Image (cartoon, rainbow, N blue to C red):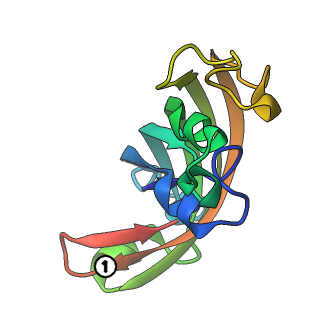
Amino acid sequence: PVFFYFVFGERGAIKNAVGNVGLNVTGFYYIPLIQYRTSFTENFKIRTEISFMSTELKHHGRYVDANTDLAKKLEGMRSKVTAVSAGVQLEYYPWQTEEYFRHTIFYPYMSAGTHFTSYNAEAYSKNGPIGIPSTTPVKYMGGFKSTSGTTMSVSGSIGTRIKFDDHNGIIID
């Protein structure tokens, strides 16, 4: 799941964070450096990844739950956000990488890399065209922008692999 917390929903309301949950699907492929045996490469892996994220944002909280004109306008406001990201990271393991395959159950790492992301954000209202007085509260007039684009980012993480058996495990990153 992907959680969003920003313009949509009442500030500080847990209902907003729980209600604006999206989907994130990621695929990883590891390029092992073990075939180039040196003391340096025995503690590193290259991780390539591609991910897709999508969510529909809407207002939640007491202002939407009321029976007012403002509540109807807020309830109709939406934003659809999608993004596709591809990147590469260099992971460093304090123990040799082949130790994980032998007997280590808990296997921490840290990584750094870069990502390229293509995104699309669309603001709209279920009540009609967004940005007009009959569908948009005064506070949000002119505050919406539907846009698409690309961006680059630098990433870093700390995580661990937890091995269940020879073929199954989980990554917490």
Q: Which residue is mark 1?
A: 163
At numbered mark 1, what does the secondary structure look like: helix, strand or loop? strand
Which of 69/46 is in front?
Answer: 69
Q: Give the residue type at disc 1.
A: Lys
Residue in the picture at 78% in, 23% down: 141
**Is 146 situated above or below 171?**
above
**Is 81 situated above or below 160?**
above
Which of 137/22 is in front?
Answer: 137
Which of 159/20 is in front?
Answer: 20
On-image quarter of the N terminus = bottom left
Q: Residues within 10 Å of mark 1 (few under 14, many from 20)?
A: some
In the rendered image, residue 162, in percent from the top left (x then y), is placed at 37, 79
The image quadrant of residue 43 is bottom right
Residue 111 seen in this snapshot: no
In the rendered image, residue 64, in percent from the top left (x then y), is placed at 58, 50
Residue in the picture at 71% in, 23% down: 144
The image quadrant of residue 137 is top right
**Count of all numbered marks drawn on residues in the image:** 1
The image quadrant of residue 14 is bottom right
In the rendered image, residue 125, in percent from the top left (x then y), is placed at 53, 25
Residue 55 seen in this snapshot: yes
Which of 110/157 is in front?
Answer: 157
Residue in the picture at 59% in, 59% down: 61
**Is 165 situated above or below 82?**
below
Q: Is residue 16 left or right of residue 1?
A: right
In the rendered image, residue 67, in percent from the top left (x then y), is placed at 55, 50
